[in-house]
Every structure is written in structure tokens, then in C-alpha cells.
């Protein structure tokens, strides 16, 4: 149960308050990680920060750029949030980094940016439809941009782990989060009713 920046319960409750409709949740499960991945593809074309040669029976090298820094910060943050699920999320972040490096090298910048743009437009459109049509509430990024961008991939993974495997970071986590989400949604509905009356 971390506090402050790493308070998983508080962050997950904030995210959950904007994602309670099952269709919207499913849309996010499908589109959040592709947004993360395609962002990394574009970041693969940033300047090289560090070149690490690896001599394992051949000439291999790790070329570290902003794509690596981006993925590594996300990975580290998730591990601090929750050791078990965070480690899985960190692994996914680093796998996305490796896969994005391979795709960027294969496509080259002139094609990669077009593929990334198309994928991002498709995924973001899906998410805005999820919020506008199904959730009927503006996305979290309009209220807390940093938290929405940083937390979304981890929370989507947590939702999958909870829904399909019954994962709970610690006993009572989901009950506490649910109570916070209900309180937030009641407050939001009351403020919405005030505006319309």
C-alpha cells in the first residue's frame, strides 16, 4: 500500500471512476497497449543516448534512445506501484521496446510514422467513442493528463488480471477501490445534475 506518487489504490480508483462501463473497459483493454507500443516505434527514431556492444558469439549491440528511456521509466514506475503485477507490466513494457525497435528498423522512418499515425488515430478514436457513447464521461486525461498517460497501460493490465484471474495486489484492495469509485461517481453525477438544473 504505497502512498503519494505510488499509491496504487488512489490512482486505480481515479482511473476506475472514468472506466466503469464494460464496453468502454473492453475498448481500453484493446487499444491502450497498442498506443504505448506505437509511441515507442516513433521514439526509436530519436537520437542515440548510449551504445552497449554485446559480444555473445556475434556482434550484437543495445542501442539505447528515448524509446528505451520511455519504456524503462514506465516499467520502473509499475514495479514500484505493485511488485507482482508491476513486474509483469514492466516485462511487457520492455518487450514492447524490443519489438518496436525491430519494427522501426524494418519499416524505416518514412513508412513508420505513417503506420504509427494510422494506428494512433484508430486507437484514440476508439477510446473517445468508448467514453462518449458508452461511458458518457470525458476521458481521465482531461482531468489529469500525466496520470492518465502514465497509469493507463498498468491499469488495463490490472483489470485483465482481476477479471480473468481474480488478482488482488493485497486483501481488500478491490473493495476499497470500488468504494472510492462509487463515491467519485456519485459526486460527479451530483455536479452534472447541478449543471443541468
Image (cartoon, helix red, strand yellow):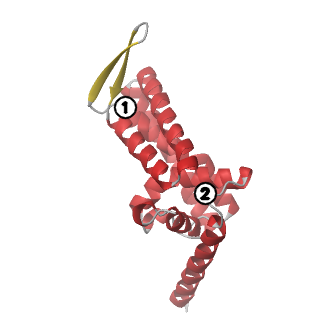
Q: Residue drawn 54% across and 80% down? A: 188
**Mark 2: few/some/many CA within 10 Å (<14, 14-19, 20+):** some
Report which quarter residue 192 is drawn in.
bottom right
Q: Which numbered circle lies on residue 17?
A: none
- The residue that mark 1 highlights is 44
Q: Is residue 79 left or right of residue 180?
A: left
Vertical side of 179 occupied by 130: above or below: above
The x and y percentages for residue 6 are: 44, 60
- Which one is nearer the viewer's eye here, 10 or 19? 10
Image quadrant occupied by the C terminus:
bottom right
Residue placed farthest to the bottom in the image?
A: 197
**Mark 1: few/some/many CA within 10 Å (<14, 14-19, 20+):** many
- Spatial CA span between label 2 and label 1: 33 Å
Q: Is residue 48 visible?
A: no
The x and y percentages for residue 180 are: 58, 75
Element marked by disc 2:
loop
Element marked by disc 1:
loop
Q: Is residue 101 visible?
A: yes
Q: Residue drawn 26% across and 31% down? A: 49
Q: Is residue 78 left or right of residue 31?
A: left
The x and y percentages for residue 193 are: 57, 87
Vertical side of 29 occupied by 19: above or below: below
- The residue that mark 2 highlights is 169
- Which one is nearer the viewer's eye here, 179 or 135? 179
The x and y percentages for residue 114 are: 43, 34
Amino acid at each position: 500500500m504505497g502512498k503519494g506518487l505510488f499509491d496504487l489504490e488512489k490512482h486505480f480508483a481515479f482511473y476506475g471512476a472514468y472506466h466503469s462501463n464494460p464496453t468502454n473497459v473492453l475498448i481500453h483493454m484493446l487499444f491502450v497497449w497498442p498506443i504505448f507500443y506505437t509511441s515507442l516505434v516513433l521514439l526509436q527514431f530519436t537520437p542515440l543516448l548510449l551504445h552497449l556492444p554485446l559480444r555473445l558469439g556475434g556482434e550484437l549491440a543495445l542501442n539505447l534512445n528515448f524509446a528505451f528511456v520511455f519504456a524503462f521509466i514506465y516499467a520502473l514506475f509499475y514495479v514500484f506501484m505493485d511488485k507482482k503485477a508491476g513486474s509483469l507490466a514492466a516485462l511487457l513494457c520492455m518487450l514492447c521496446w524490443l519489438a518496436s525497435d525491430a519494427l522501426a528498423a524494418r519499416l524505416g522512418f518514412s513508412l513508420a510514422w505513417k503506420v504509427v499515425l494510422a494506428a494512433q488515430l484508430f486507437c484514440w478514436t476508439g477510446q473517445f467513442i468508448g467514453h462518449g457513447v458508452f461511458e458518457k464521461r470525458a476521458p481521465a486525461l482531461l482531468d489529469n493528463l500525466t496520470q492518465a498517460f502514465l497509469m493507463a497501460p498498468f491499469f488495463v493490465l490490472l483489470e485483465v488480471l482481476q477479471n480473468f484471474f481474480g488478482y488482488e495486489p493485497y486483501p481488500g484492495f478491490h473493495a476499497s477501490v470500488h468504494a472510492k469509485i462509487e463515491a467519485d461517481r456519485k459526486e460527479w453525477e451530483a455536479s452534472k445534475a447541478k449543471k443541468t438544473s
